[in-house]
Image (cartoon, coloured by chain):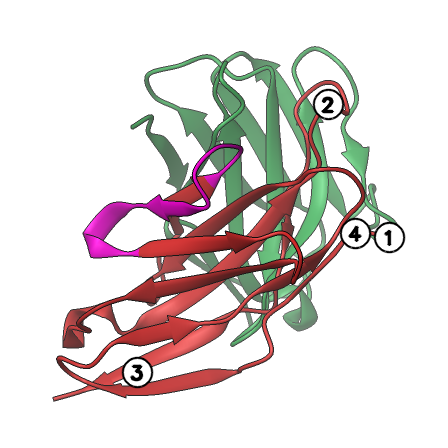
Amino acid sequence: GAVVSQHPSRVICKSGTSVKIECRSLDFQATTMFWYRQFPKKSLMLMATSNEGSKATYEQGVEKDKFLINHASLTLSTLTVTSAHPEDSSFYICSAPTSTNEQFFGPGTRLTVL
Amino acid sequence: AQSVAQPEDQVNVAEGNPLTVKCTYSVSGNPYLFWYVQYPNRGLQFLLKYITGDNLVKGSYGFEAEFNKSQTSFHLKKPSALVSDSALYFCAVRRPFSGGYNKLIFGAGTRLAVHP
């Protein structure tokens, strides 16, 4: 199947700093990517839909100025957590659909804000 | 509103026994249904999907799922559980023909624990 990568896999940062997470589709192009947040022992919460060449679409209750999304190319979307705080600590997962509309997920990024 | 329910937080099974992880859905029209598995600190891996056709769908690692339209269920099954099957399992639904790349709606997840 198709491969989606995320970088970094794990990041620890100080409160108040910003963290960028990359999501790449390695062997296919994705005009759309999805960003999810997963709390411990909980389901995935869709945060936003990343659209190549245009603004991301955020789900209700997700602060767009807090979670900046950029989809600059057909294989790369980035999520930047700005002015991170401990409550932003979570597992962030991206996914990308192929041309047949089948979604493939990245391995996730564990963010810990001290 | 579309929703997916996984009524069990955890399912415990002895190795070698059959397993079932339950999923029911609520969505208008004929849905596309999916099962994903997640190992600790990893992303989701696709197991199987139902779009149309035979109600019994076979997927990866010996898993299968049965679509039951009258009961709006899509339970995941495996005839003989392995300890390595222990993981978090998610059922998901996507409404077809909505245009563009559709969002997946996930259930809360069910933790499967297979004991030796």
Instruction: In this rendered view, identify the residue nearer to me: A77 or B56.
Output: B56
Amino acid carrying label 3: it is Ala
Does residue A8 appear in the picture of this structure? Answer: no
How far apart marks 3 and 1 lie (CA) works out to: 31 Å
| Residue A73 shown left or right of residue A88 in the figure | left
Pointer 4: what residue?
A: B2
Amino acid carrying label 1: it is Ala
Is residue B57 highlighted in magenta? yes
**In the rendered structure, which disc, 3 or 4, sits on the residue that comes first in sequence?**
4
Pointer 2: what residue?
A: B97
How far apart marks 1 and 2 lie (CA) works out to: 16 Å
Pointer 1: what residue?
A: B1
Q: Which chain is red?
A: B
Q: Which quadrant is the C terminus of chain B positioned in?
A: bottom left
Per the rendering, the mark at residue B73 is none
Q: Nearer the viewer, mark 3 or mark 4?
A: 4
